[in-house]
Amino acid sequence: MTDGGNFKVVPTFVGNKLGCAQAQLHQKKKAKEADGDDLPIPEEILAHLEELKADELATLNVTQLKALSKLVAQQTEEVDRQATEMELTRDKVLGTIGNIVHEDCRPTKDEEQNEIVRTWGEPRLETEGLLNHVDLMEKLGLETGETATKISGGRAFFLVGPLVQLQLALVNYSMNFMIGRNYTPLYPPFFMTKEGMASVAQLSQFDEELYKVTGEGDEKYLIATSEQPIAGFHKNKWFAEKDLPIKYAGYSTCFRKEVGSHGRDTLGIFRVHQFEKIEQFCVTSGKDNKSWEMMNEMIQASEDFYQSLGIPYRVVRIVAGALNDAAAMKLDLEAYFCSSSTYRELVSCSNCTDFQSRRLSARMGTGKSAGQKQAKEHVHMLNSTLCAITRAMCVICETYQTEEGIAIPEVLRPYMGGMELMRWTVEKKAEPAPKAKKEEKPKPKKQAEQTPKATTATPAAAAKAEEESS
């Protein structure tokens, strides 16, 4: 190490010189040489320690060698301290540099230019008489008004009756869905230390997203997604290539301040401070496009999940300028909300390549203990929503609304005791949602297919017909 700006950094040779001085001291002790007088170490030796030879050390007596060893030990300690400070400064700067963006992401900040990759399903395009998810859930007992806000503040809610059953059904169905795809269930802690969170979250999240918990001991932060503690779970770990990929299905409550969304979605439970979520998290080799193959597998899992629920959706590739620091590419799954005739995000699937693993020192190989000599390789890490429960509940209610209540998607019925319809529990005359004016959006340059045309056989209509015939 050399001069480091405003402070001097002691050269790293001091550790070697300490060993040399101690070796010479050992030889003199072995030869039973007298300690000698307590004389100062000659200036010519102190002036060029970096070039000091063994024969020069031999001119010192035992007492002088002890003093030199102590001096060099102090310098070594100072070097270690300054090296740690410089590494922290370096890592702080490196932490502001984002991942290398994949070439398929459009080079713009304008999210109107997000590329539509594909669409699925037959959206319920007629809006006459349809209610939005806020009004529908209030008829099922959802409480987001004064009662909730007085207790817990804005965006607070109480689920009551069948809505609780629907939430639990989605949690259990989601987890079983992932277990069926060889994902390992993982239930993480709901808060992390400041150091632990800093290794998996970017600086802007601390102000806009994360809740800080104070009390006894070190300060902690509530997790915004199980991705954060699951990523931290792999800190300083080595992985054998033969054991990859590793696939987790994380289940947790998530807590978000939603500072950046002030004024948006203030009604209902689409955007709230507390919600349940099932998350996919995968660790792969960085070789042979393995992580990109895994990304395709993860977004397909999310698509298959919403297809099983009968929810029309589209998949879009997010433009480069809208990616967070960690993601090399992000695909969103946006479900169709029929009351407003709009697609809204339910799933985000990101390939972070080795961005997170470098910060966490999560590597692939046999580890140093086995004598590994090749250059260390960092694993790749990916994450994807499977089901953000409250958002899934919103779109299910809109898609499956009938005059009598909300029809239950067939795959969820076994998890709700065979219930086929959530009947209205609150007498409330809700006004139909006004027909939304469609915004004129620029046509994407690469569009796999257009939004399907409307058909008469919607999931809710089919469920209602089945009920009436029985």
Image (tube, rainbow, N blue to C red):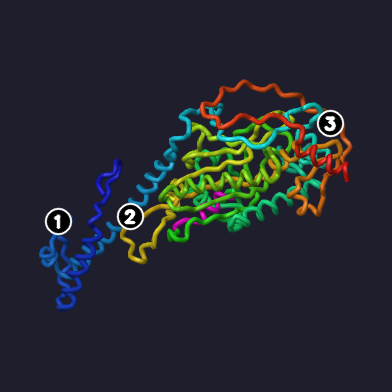
Amino acid residing under circle 2: Ala
Between the residue at mark 3 and the residue at mark 1, the CA separation in whole angstroms equals 87 Å
Dot 2 corresponds to which residue? 375
Quadrant of the image occupied by residue 136: top right
Name the spot of residue 163 as percent of width and height, x first.
78, 46
Say which element carries label 2: loop
The x and y percentages for residue 112 are 56, 26
Residue pictured at 14% horizontal, 59% vertical: 52
Q: Secondary structure at mark 1?
A: helix
Rendered location of residue 255, percent (x, y): 63, 45
Say which residue label 1 marks: 51
> Would you name the residue on which mark 3 appears?
430
Is residue 256 toward the left or the right of residue 286 in the image? right
Where residue 45 appears, as percent x and y from the top left, is 14, 58
Q: Amino acid at mark 3?
A: Ala
Of mark 3 and mark 1, the one earlier in the sequence is: 1
3D distance between C-alphas at marks 2 and 3:
64 Å
Tell me if residue 363 is in the magenta stretch: no
In what element is the residue under mark 3?
Answer: loop
Q: Is residue 33 above or below residue 322?
A: below
Q: Nearer the viewer, residue 32 or 439?
A: 439
